[in-house]
Image: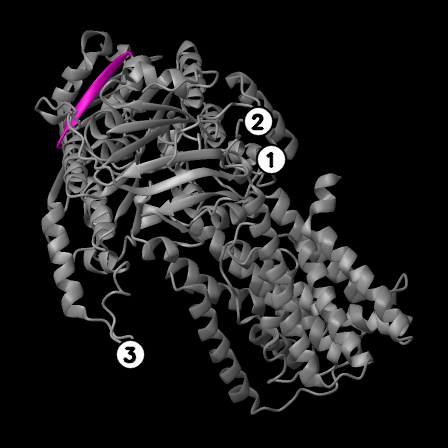
Amino acid sequence: MKHFVKSREFTLFIMILVFGILVSILSPAFLTGNNLSNILNNSIPNIILGCGMTMVIITGGIEIAVGAEMVVCSFVVGTIAKSSSGNLLLVFLAALAAGMLLGMINGSLIAILNVPPIIATLGTLNIYRGGLLYATSGKWIMSLPSWLTGLTRDRFLGLPVSVYLVTLVVLLTTGILKYTKFGRSIYAVGGNEEAAFRVGIHKKKTLFGVYVYAGVMCGIAGLVNAARVGNVQPNGSVNLEMTIVAAVVMGGTSILGGSGTAIGTVLGVIMMTLIDNVLILLYVPTYWQKFALGAILIITITMNVIQELYLKKKQMPIDVDEELEGLEVKTL
Amino acid sequence: MAQDYFLSLENISKTFPGVKALDQVQLHIRPGEVHALLGENGAGKSTLIKVMSGVYKPDEGGRMEICGEPVKFNDINESIQKGVSVIYQDLCLFPNLTVAENLCIGKDISRKGWIQWKEYDQMAKETLKRLNVEIPIYEKLGNLSIARQQLVAIARAIAFEARLIVMDEPTASLSRSEVEVLFEIIRKLKKDGISVLFISHKLDEVMAISDRMTVLRDGTFVGSKPVSEVTEQEIIHMMVGRNIEYIKLNETSNATERVVAEVSHISKKGHFKDISFSVKEGEILGITGLVGAGRTEVMKSLFGLLPPDEGKIWLDGNLVQLKGTQDAKRHGISFVPEDRQTESLVMEFDVHDNVNLVNYERFRSKLGFLNRKKLMSMTGDMMEQMDVRPRVPERKVREFSGGNQQKIVIGKWLSSNPKLLLVDEPTYGVDIGSKIEIHKLLRRLAAEGMAIIVVSSELQEVLTLTDRILVMRKGRLVAELHANSATQEKIMEYALPQGKREEIK
């Protein structure tokens, strides 16, 4: 229990509560069912992407192509959905396959060819963005069919279907991270690569798997986001990757690798979406929203670092014997 | 005969491009024996361990047998399965994971890829119990002391059913009482029929714990003997091929009456309390005690890295505030830290760039540009003065031997012409030949008028190198001894917990 209270997740949870209470006082529009379900809906694609990103960052890597990859998957989903033979199962499988393929490309570059993750994904990011504009000539895919948009609008037991989907994703990610050999290998590689090698963990397989997982998450997020927005914009979700990285780090995942949880990421994403939402409700201009997001990221991380430094400084490495009568050395 | 040994290596050679690291080496380890592997730095000990554990493949022609059966390892996993576990100096554990997981990770008690946490916990508890050590299994490993992390590493080997545990310099960062705990555990392993290959530079420890020993020199096999049949002198002779003793360098002191630095009643909470001493021009002052007695912390205070909470420091008769390393450097203080690889050297830089890191301020024009010509000649002079070999300033520091790296570190700090030189463990992990060279160099610097403070755990070093010895215990200064009248036993009487406290002058 004590451990739980001290955890990053708990702190974040409390922060969200306090923030929520403050805001509901400031803006009566905040605590309405409509607005809350809006926050939830907007969070869902980011939580899914965040789950993949969490794994990547725990290994000590980074994936900055997630936004582009999600849009590529949305595009695949939209194209199939608009065709006559489209149905939900087919677009779901197509989104998974597209995401997996994109993940395998990153995985091959990073795990097999040893390209540094930031370079590999910076490359694929630009290739996909360029490719999308070429393939679509910048045209949107408009008015997606209702069987697709229903994913985020139709309710089952009072909640949108997508909420069940995202819950499943978070549980799956948590389960993998905590209860599978693959999941523990992710922490091991991120914690001490050399030690991981020496206990027989395959770094290449682990990294490859992680980027494939992140790709699959892009696929699912692409599906959900297309359903949520109701259309596909080839140049949409630009800079989304930075929001995701920020949310993951805010959720307690160490940017240096080795630690992090999916639950933390969920809270991180909700916090970020909440801030976004509140600024809109308070009629703050868009540029200030960006400004606030950046500032909040820096503040959270700095606080975290200061806290760690403080704990380190407080450490007393030597058990000084206070009772012992010290030697009086004659001084001048 | 084959059954007599758990592990048997015959005629093992290992060639790297351009170097023969091992040449026809033999090693025979019996079940349940503690076997010491000895040799200077670069003698081939590390290469041999790596061959035994499957990191390197030996050249054709040698034989490796486990319990009489020939084996060939393709990777580390295969050696672990055959019961050979290596505990490297850096331990190779996961600081971000719990003790329990560190013990079990890689061990396949997962079912179809699913981790069984309960079984992990159970196994961790049982393993630690077998070793009779109490470590909370849910604690993050990174929060434990190095000594306890080491116990976790040993427990890990046990959990993997090791029949032979290789310990590479296991006592390097342990205090004497922690070493006792380790030895107790080694004895327990022995009783269970588990063999230990013990690698250490500290011969007294080797003599205390080992049954037999094997000595390597320059990648060749020198000999194997029961420890009871040899003396320390004979071992040193086998290791270096010549009789080297610590040479007593401190018969006459060069100390003048001029006090260079004086420390008066300094304290730092959780580090040390009420420390007072002074050091004179031309004097080498030794500070000894067990690891964790606060010696390094006092040095750090003098170098501005750990400003004391109270107390005063005078340099050349002036009261000074040392709030950072810049202050210390400006007052002519240099500090050679203990761990050259992480605290002193940029391993990927060449000698030139390493040395000049401390000199940039002196050779900078008003616009901030560096005088490269002067800096270059500085490096050359230093390498000559320190006798660094090979004398190639463009060579990466990583590629030098431990002894030469240490000379570079000392040389780097000397190039800024300090008045007061602080040296923490001047010859840690350095072979005995270089050790004596470094000692001679420090004496020469003292003779030229430098004030030097040497922190060392090695009593022989303090006794033969310094003029005056301070002993610390649990953050307190407990004795001041004259090097010429002190003995190892006398120092230990003060250094050990519950030891004496008395001034001998």
Chain to which the residue tagged by mark 3 belongs: B
Separation of residues labelled 2 and 3 (CA atoms)? 57 Å
Reading the image, the residue beneath label 1 is: B139
Query: Dots 1 and 2: beta carbons under 8 Å?
Result: yes
> Could you say which quadrant of the image residue B196 lies in?
top left
Q: Amino acid at mark 2?
A: Ile
| Residue B272 rendering spot, x and y as whole percentages | 48, 35
Label 1 sits on a secondary structure element that is loop
| Residue A91 rendering spot, x and y as whole percentages | 67, 71
Reading the image, the residue beneath label 3 is: B367
Q: Residue furthest top?
A: B229
The residue at 66%/55% (across/down) is A262
Q: Which circle, 3 or 1, is nearer the viewer? A: 3
Say if the magenta span includes residue B157: no
Label 2 sits on a secondary structure element that is loop
Chain to which the residue tagged by mark 2 belongs: B
Report if residue B388 is visible in the image.
Answer: no
Q: Foreground: B122 or B423?
A: B423
Query: Dots 3 and 1: beta carbons under 8 Å?
Result: no
Separation of residues labelled 3 and 1 (CA atoms)? 53 Å
How many marks are shown on the rendered structure? 3
Q: Which circle, 2 or 3, is nearer the viewer? A: 3
Q: Residues within 10 Å of mark 3 (few under 14, many from 20)?
A: few
Report if residue B129 is visible in the image.
Answer: yes
Q: Quadrant of the N terminus of chain B?
A: top left
A113 up-or-down from B364: above or below: above
Q: Amino acid at mark 3?
A: Leu
Query: Dots 2 and 3: beta carbons under 8 Å?
Result: no
Reading the image, the residue beneath label 2 is: B135
Label 3 sits on a secondary structure element that is loop
